[in-house]
Image (tube, rainbow, N blue to C red):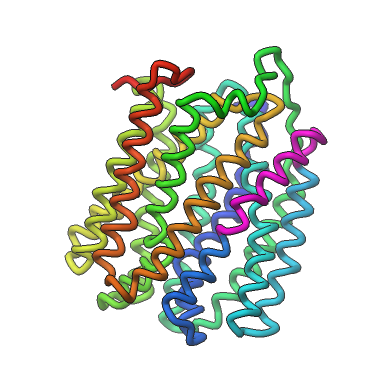
Amino acid sequence: MSNVPYWRLSAFYFFYFSFVGAMAPYWGLYLKSLGFAAFQIGVLMSLLQVMRMFAPNVWGHLADHSGRRVPIIQMATLACLIVYLGVFVEQSFWWLFAVMSLISFFWSAPLPLVEATTLTHLGEQTEHYGRIRLWGSIGFILVVLGLGSALDHFAIGLVPWVVLGLLIGIWLSSRFIPEAVVIQAGQDHTPLAQVLRRPAVWALLAAAILMAAAHGPYYTFFTIHLVEAGYSKSFAGWMWALGVICEIVVFLLMPRILRHVRVETVFFLTLLTAALRFLAIGWWVEHLAVLLVAQTLHALSFGAYHAAAMALVHRHFRGRIQARGQALYNSLAFGVGGTAGSLYAGAAWDALGAAWTFSLGASLAALAAIVFAWRGWRSPRGGAGDFDI
């Protein structure tokens, strides 16, 4: 990794996922403090995913055709920062709806382009991706613990100010990302439409949509679920952090794991782990031992899953379609899947209760992802990455 700009890429991941560490656990609590109902919270939280249905494809198309990703990353992060200032102007539902929609439009641009840039810098050393990405997990941990502890002593109104500081960090770190030269080898000229016809590819994308949807109740209501079960906000922060600490361990181990285990096998096992984990969170959150085990499983249901998914996306989407492949993965998984999961969680939370919300919307979605992955990768026309355990 001597020629890889490790620290400059890592800095962006650090601030980007520090932002997630403030938004995912605590923005829902902030919205609840403004008097919004569960469904309204679900709608507003889903907006962080809605624009990812189509916006990443716009950014990815521009990046692939211009051959320059970094200027788009820098422009989008600055626009996101400017738009975010609107949350301090007014706190009505429809105003926040408009502001968060615009935030999502610009926020959806940087990550897939940075992912493509990172993987391009790594070249054939994609097993080292986790060593860069783990700095995002470290940022997430620091913010989720620090902010959770602070909220036991300060008002929830602290949250939007912390988020503002992190958005400034995202923009500043984007200024130091070096452009990566995409090598246009002959094998990299496969048209996007032809790649998408491979059963292995549509199986990956379908499973990714369902896996993101499975996380909808977790990212929208996990903190609220813990607080309603009698835990403190700082304890909720520690539970988020525990999962991400385990995730970091997996990121460090992934190069060694992938030398001995097929990436498809890892992917498949992470889906099964997610189904079991969300079932445990839904039904036995009051049992501390079960909760601790469930959060430890985040190492597999997110860490190993994400590393495996990135390796598979990089395998199938090469050269001139690399940025569009990352954008398509992000728009389908986090856009379609994430939005569906958040909206489902908001609608089901009061109607079904926490246990059934996690059971029906999270565990079943992960199990359905297993079916898609199995059918696509067992297909005789599966292409690169046929599944065989």
The chief SS type of the magenta part is: helix
Residue numbers of the magenta segment: 49-69
On the image, the x and y values in percent for residue 290 come to 19, 58
| In the foreground, 332 or 298 | 332
Q: Quadrant of the C terminus?
A: top left
> Who's the residue at 47% across and 68% down the image?
146
Verify whether residue 58 appears in magenta. Answer: yes
Query: Residue 359 sits in which quadrant?
Result: bottom left
Query: Residue 239 sits in which quadrant?
Result: bottom left
Q: How many marks?
A: 0
| In the foreground, 187 or 299 | 187
Please say if 31 is above or below 196: below
Q: Decide if residue 366 is on the left or right side of residue 150.
A: left
Q: Decide if residue 311 is on the left or right side of residue 83.
A: left
Please say if 183 is above or below 5: above
Q: Quadrant of the N terminus?
A: top right
Residue 150 in view: no
> Who's the residue at 65% across and 79% down the image?
95
On the image, the x and y values in percent for residue 156 come to 50, 82
> Who's the residue at 67% across and 26% down the image?
3
On the image, the x and y values in percent for residue 203 come to 44, 32
Verify whether residue 66 appears in magenta. Answer: yes
Please say if 331 is above or below 287: above
Q: Decide if residue 48 is on the left or right side of residue 324.
A: left
Q: Decide if residue 294 is on the left or right side of residue 11.
A: left
> Who's the residue at 39% across and 58% down the image?
241
On the image, the x and y values in percent for residue 172 come to 73, 56
Residue 224 in view: yes
